Every structure is written in structure tokens, then in C-alpha cells.
Image (tube, helix red, strand yellow):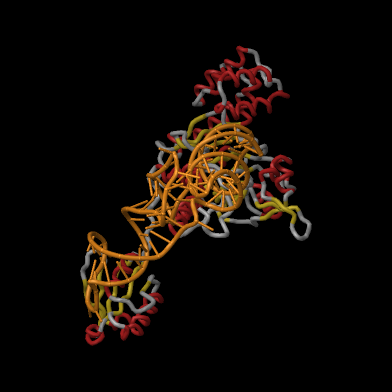
Amino acid sequence: MATSEFARLPGFRDFPPEDLALRSHIQEAWRRVARRYGFSEYDGPPLESLDLYVEKSGEEIVGQLYDFVDKGDRPVALRPEMTPSLARILADRSRGMSKPIRWFSMPQLFRYERQQRGRLREHFQWNVDIVGEAGVGADAEVVAVAIDGLRELGLTSEDFAARVSDRRLLNAVLGVVGVASDRRSAAFGVIDKIERMPAEKADELLRDEVGLNGAAVERLRAILAASSIDELADLLGDEGGADEEMANLRDYIGILMSMGLADFVELDLRIVRGLAYYTGIVFELFDRKGELRAICGGGRYDRLLELVGGEALPAVGFGMGDVVLGELLAERDLVPEYRPRVDYFLVPITEDQRAELLRIAHVLRERGHSVAYELRERGVGKQMKAATREGADTVLLLGPDEMERGCVVARDMQTGEESDVPLSELA
RNA sequence: GUGGGCGUAGCUCAGUCGGUUAGAGCGCCGGAUUGUGGUUCCGGAGGUCGCCGGUUCAAAUCCGGUCGUCCACCCCA
């Protein structure tokens, strides 16, 4: 609660050490996995020109942006997503770069919306993109990174899966089922929400908005329920019309099987993704229990770079937020316990040894060890308690006796064993 | 943006048919312990009961508003 006069803004988080530990745990895993796949890290400014988002996503997105006019009368916005910035950055320099470009980032993103579980006004999002490769090899590579990012944190195929689809395939399928070309985008909208509405409501929309008859609605429902490429092929029969898209998606899934990730991948044509700029394969990672919102979403966006004024390059990528992921890790008991720790905690028995201890502390720090001690005079018992609280590996005790013998006593805080360390080793 | 639940100590919560100085556990600080921690015992600090207003002799308790939070909707990176 807000006892302080200055309360935290709603939807924003503080990160005291015990909370920053989880965020770091997640981000370090993300970074390790991205590097393991040969991606390079980049970043951009958190504040961008408002136009960058309006051009791409339309006026209605402005209601969900943190935007304002700066002192130079420029309409600006805190970045709500990273992809437009990536497109802008590459528009300037991609022509001179070898392809494909494999970049990742972990920006803090902002949106102005009412917060609820798994959705704040600020979050950190892992963005991984491959730019300059149109083939399904890039699509598969990117989803493999996302899957391995979660595996790195201890999640398994019991915990989550990737649901994959392809907008071109869905478009072709809609053609096969008989959706007129001017009704396709309406159909996309209904299919995107179909899981969250009652069946009668969906049927009604498919009839009235999309223009399908009863039999076609039935057939489309069956097709949308397919969870493998073979099942989908059976349902489509020999009519053709989607052959090329089917072969494409089959290759994609084949690559993921070769990687040993088959357990993590399911076909699901209901995955559409809201973002208008997706053009091909799209996917979401979700928890298998279905308790949380999507952990990660991504796909192919082959037009975006030229829209922003850059080289016409195909691209594919995803974003994964730290909020939902943190909740999933907590539910699966995969959040490491936060423990402060230091290598050495130094204890002067009397103040007469403090100068020598400060010297030793500095020697150990120069050697790269972490060292702590009480900053003012306290009893030995108190200092030992403090050493425990600080998570000391070893306590070095120095009193008049040790000074005389030319050593310190090193106490192993795990075992309680003590041994002498000559001062000559700490010079 | 719409509708609903909740809001008592740092944390988890108890306490309300309105009635003297509002409680517990954990945590924190101090002491038992002026050359040895994790256990234990003793003591202490910390709350204008989210905030503002109303009803009342009297409000943590009832009413209204507001802010925060959670849930659903909307939307989705």
C-alpha cells in the first residue's frame, strides 16, 4: 500500500534485490540462449516518434500508447513494441550488412492500458529476429530459440507448447472452404477470437459476417480443430488450392522435428495474432494448463522493413515478456530462492584489528573476491550473525592472538571448521 | 474505456449487530552473549484501519465519492 506520499505509478514495478533476482534470472537465460544460436544483442531508444507506431498499426493504437508532445513539439511515444524500432534501425544500415541478420534485444516496453494479471504498463520483452531470409529455415530457427529460452529456465513440454499456424495457409484454406476474398480479413478476425466465444456466437458470425453456409461452417470448424499437418491434409482432401502452403508448413514442422522439438509443436490454425504486419507463419507459446495468457508470440513480417522505408527484406521474429513468464515459473516452482552471498566476511575481535582487516579486505577484493564486514564496532556474536545474514562462505576472524601468531582464523560457514591462514598469504 | 470483488503493522492475516489506549504470527531493532553464526528466551519499535466526505453522542466497522489492487469485458507487443 502507498504509505509514502509518492506512490508508484499503477502498472509499474519496483525491483528490490529479491525481485530483481527473478528478472535477472530470466534475462540471463534469454541472453545465453540467444548467443547459443549466434544472435547479436542490440538496443534502441525507449522513446520514439509517434508516427513510427501510427503508420504501422493505425490510429486506434494511440489509445494504448504512452504518448505526449515533447518540448520541441514532436509527438513522441514510449515504445510499445520493439519491431518498429528494429525496422527503423535496419532501414538505415541493412544494405551494407551480410544476410541473414540475426539480432536480439531485451527492451523495456510500455503501454497505456488498465493493468491486470500478466499485463502491466511496463515489461521487459525478449525480441529475437532473423532478417533477410525468406525460407522456412528462418521461421523454424526463431521458434526453436523461443522454445529453448523456456527450456533453459526449467520448463518442459509438460509445461508449455508452441501453437503454430500460417496466415497464407489459413487464407488458402478459407478459399477452399468458400470464403470470398473480400471477407477473408473478417474471417481472420472471427477465427482469432473463436476460442473465447460460445460456439453459437461463432457460427452466427461465420454465417453473417463471413458469408458461409451451414455446411461450410461445419467444415471450417473441423479444419480449425486439426492439430497436425496430416490431419489437416486429410480434411482438405485432393481439392488443391492450398498445396504450396501445406508443403511449406510441412517443411517447417519437419525442421523442428529434426531438432528434436516435436513435443513442443502443435498445428493450430486458430492462431492468427492481432498484429496487422504478420504475413506468413505465426506462433504462440502458451502454458499447457491454459491458466495464463500467451507467454510469447511471433511470426513472419515480410513487408515491414519496406513500409518503414528500408530495404525490402523478409523477416521473422518473436517477443516474449517477463511478466507472464515470471508467473509461470512461480507456479512451477522454478523461481530460484533469493540469497545474498559474499565470499568472505571479516570479523575484528576488537577495534585494534580493524586497520589490518581493511587491508586484507582490499587485498581479497583486488583478487576478485566479494568481501563484507561490519562498518562499526560490534560484538563478535553480532558480527557472526551478520555474516550469516550476508550469506558469507567463509568468515575470517582476527584478534590479538592471531595478530601475535601472524595469521587469521578462517571459519567455513557450512561445516564450522576453522583453520589458520598465514598473513603472508594475504599480503 | 465498461462492470464487479477487495483495501487493518514491512509481509500473511484476525478483529465489524458502531462503544474505552486496534491484535497475532513472521520479519525488523535491542538484550541474554564484550573471541564465534544458523536454535532458543526476553524486551522494543512500527498502524491517522488506503484517502476524502457524510450519518451518529461515538466509525476500522454504516453510506457516498475517490485512489489502489484483483477479476471479467475491450485490446493485445
Residue A322: image x %, image y %?
A: 51, 48
Evaluate whether residue A221 shows in this view: yes
In terms of depth relative to the viewer, which is nearer, A159 or A351? A351
Side of A185 where A255 appears, left or right: left
Against A290, residue A225 (above or below) is above
Residue at 72% from the left image edge and 53% from the top image edge:
A68
Residue at 75% from the left image edge and 54% from the top image edge:
A69
Quarter location, residue A376? bottom left
Counting labels gives 0
In terms of depth relative to the viewer, which is nearer, A241 or A339? A339
Residue A341: image x %, image y %?
A: 36, 64
Residue at 22% from the left image edge and 84% from the top image edge:
A401
Residue A307: image x %, image y %?
A: 73, 44
Residue furthest right in the image: A73
Evaluate whether residue A262 shows in this view: no
Quadrant (top left/top right/bottom left/bottom right) for the C terminus of chain A: bottom left
Side of A96 where A340 appears, left or right: left
Against A42, residue B60 (above or below) is above
Residue at 30% from the left image edge and 68% from the top image edge:
A385
Residue B67: image x %, image y %?
A: 60, 49
In terms of depth relative to the viewer, which is nearer, A50 or A175? A50
Against A336, residue A246 (above or below) is above
